[in-house]
Image: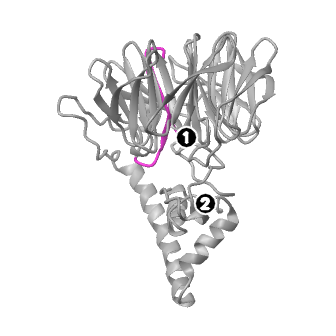
């Protein structure tokens, strides 16, 4: 999952079949293949995700060219060693403490690494006490990714179409499709994300290294803020836009009125960000950590280890007196106490946990394996699960409705929780 230079088209950065930094797929996984071994196999094939199985084959053929017998022997040996390393890594992940980050916050910030609680400390799933009912499935653009919702609109970033869809919750139909810009080959497509406070909708124009503002009254682009980096996700808090750039290892703070960059904070491979009056939280995907930013200083206040080193946290949400983070490879949702900056629970959910949203006393998690879970925030127990067509990845909640985007199906599903 290493980026390749643009001048090697056969193994250029892929438009992931499964979008997001946690994934690197070019087709069906190999039977019995562990994730660490998959990553090592990808690296042997050229050090990158590739566009298609033929391209993958060409890349692997290139690694075996020259002395065929000798290369074949080395390749076979590397597979054996790769599998052995995966077994060792799997064992070590269950016995060893969490891997610590090489990134060190500034000397004025407090930095702590919290070890993962033992399995007995994590709330376990129980029999369903509620139901999640599918109300409607709505076609949108290609590869819908991060969403934002209000009482009167659901905004969807279609990363494969270069558009934003607006859904009317009253009719469960798309009432506007807004062109955003270029579909230049980027790491995650474009646009990747939207965020709103109700008065404006902000869009991450990844391909054009910019933010765009949509006026919800007219469904038109009104402002473009150029950036020096490729944006990935956005959070809105008052007059601040907090923007992650996964490829540039940065978190940006931008004034929404003036478009001026107020701060640039170094964060390793940041994905999503959440902000409220008490602080800003940003996920560091390949660092397996959550960083807390102090807005008064624009500096890192604390680093919290949330995974074992290969769990790939993806999405963060704030609610019910806690901060919630999904572990895509760990198949869990993590609860952090913001008063102590300590991980207090790991809650098992379905495979490939990705999107997380809070709504009152419920935490909703979308898993790429095809399900959505509703978690009781007070007890950490899974109250309900529901199958969702396609590959559900991202979530949003507003006015009693849960919205889930399925990237491969190009749809958004509306669900209702019954208790």
Residue 316 visible in the picture = no
Q: Main secondary structure of the magenta part?
A: strand
Q: Nearer the viewer, residue 49 or 302?
A: 49
Q: Nearer the viewer, residue 332 or 243?
A: 243
Q: Nearer the viewer, residue 93 or 336?
A: 336
Where residue 140 sits: x, y (%)?
76, 31
Seen at 42% across and 58% down, the residue is 89
Where residue 187 sits: x, y (%)?
56, 47
Q: Earlier in the sequence, mark 1 or mark 2?
A: 2
The answer to which image quadrant residue 339 occupies is top left
Which type of secondary structure does the marked residue at label 1 adopt? Answer: loop
Count of picture labels: 2
**In which quadrant of the rendered image does the C terminus lie?**
top right
Seen at 60% across and 54% down, the residue is 14
Q: Nearer the viewer, residue 120 or 141?
A: 141
**Residue that mark 1 sits on:** 331
**Residue that mark 2 sits on:** 50
Segment colored magenta: 309-327
**Which disc is residue 33 wearing?**
none
Where residue 296 sits: x, y (%)?
28, 17
The answer to which image quadrant residue 241 occupies is top left
**Between marks 1 and 2 in the image, the one whose residue lies nearer the viewer:** 2
């Amino acid at each position: 999952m290493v980026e390749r230079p643009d001048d090697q088209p056969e193994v250029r950065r892929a438009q992931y079949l499964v979008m997001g930094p946690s994934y690197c797929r070019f087709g069906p996984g190999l039977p019995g293949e562990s994730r660490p071994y998959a990553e090592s196999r990808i690296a042997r094939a050229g050090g990158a995700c590739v566009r298609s199985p033929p391209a993958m084959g060409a890349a692997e053929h290139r690694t075996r060219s020259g002395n065929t017998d000798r290369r074949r022997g080395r390749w076979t040996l590397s597979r054996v060693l790769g599998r052995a390393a995966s077994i060792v890594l799997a064992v070590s992940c269950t016995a060893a403490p969490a891997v610590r980050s090489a990134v060190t916050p500034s000397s004025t910030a407090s930095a702590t690494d919290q070890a993962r609680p033992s399995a007995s400390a994590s709330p376990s799933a129980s029999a369903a006490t509620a139901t999640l009912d599918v109300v409607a499935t709505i076609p949108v653009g290609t590869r819908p990714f991060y969403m934002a919702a209000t009482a009167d609109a659901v905004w969807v970033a279609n990363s494969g179409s270069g558009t934003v869809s607006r859904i009317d919750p009253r009719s469960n139909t798309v009432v506007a499709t807004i062109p955003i810009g270029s579909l230049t080959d980027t790491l995650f497509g474009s646009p990747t994300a939207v965020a709103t406070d109700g008065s404006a909708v902000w869009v991450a124009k990844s391909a054009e290294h910019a933010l765009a503002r949509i006026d919800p009254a007219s469904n038109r682009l009104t402002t473009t803020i150029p950036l020096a980096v490729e944006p990935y996700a956005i959070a809105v808090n008052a007059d601040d836009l907090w923007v992650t750039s996964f490829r540039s290892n940065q978190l940006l703070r931008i004034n929404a009125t003036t478009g001026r960059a107020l701060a640039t904070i170094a964060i390793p491979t940041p994905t999503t960000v959440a902000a409220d009056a008490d602080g800003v939280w940003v996920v560091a995907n390949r660092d397996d950590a959550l960083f807390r930013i102090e807005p008064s200083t624009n500096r890192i206040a604390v680093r919290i280890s949330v995974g074992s080193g290969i769990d790939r946290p993806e999405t963060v949400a704030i609610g019910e007196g806690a901060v919630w983070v999904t572990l895509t490879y760990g198949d869990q949702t993590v609860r952090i106490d913001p008063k102590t900056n300590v991980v207090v629970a790991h809650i098992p959910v379905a495979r490939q946990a990705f999107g997380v949203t809070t709504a009152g006393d419920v935490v909703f998690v979308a898993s790429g394996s095809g399900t959505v879970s509703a978690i009781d925030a007070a007890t950490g127990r899974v109250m309900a699960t529901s199958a969702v067509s396609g590959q559900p990845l991202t979530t949003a909640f507003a006015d009693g409705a849960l919205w889930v985007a399925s990237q491969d199906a190009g749809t958004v599903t509306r669900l209702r929780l019954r208790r």
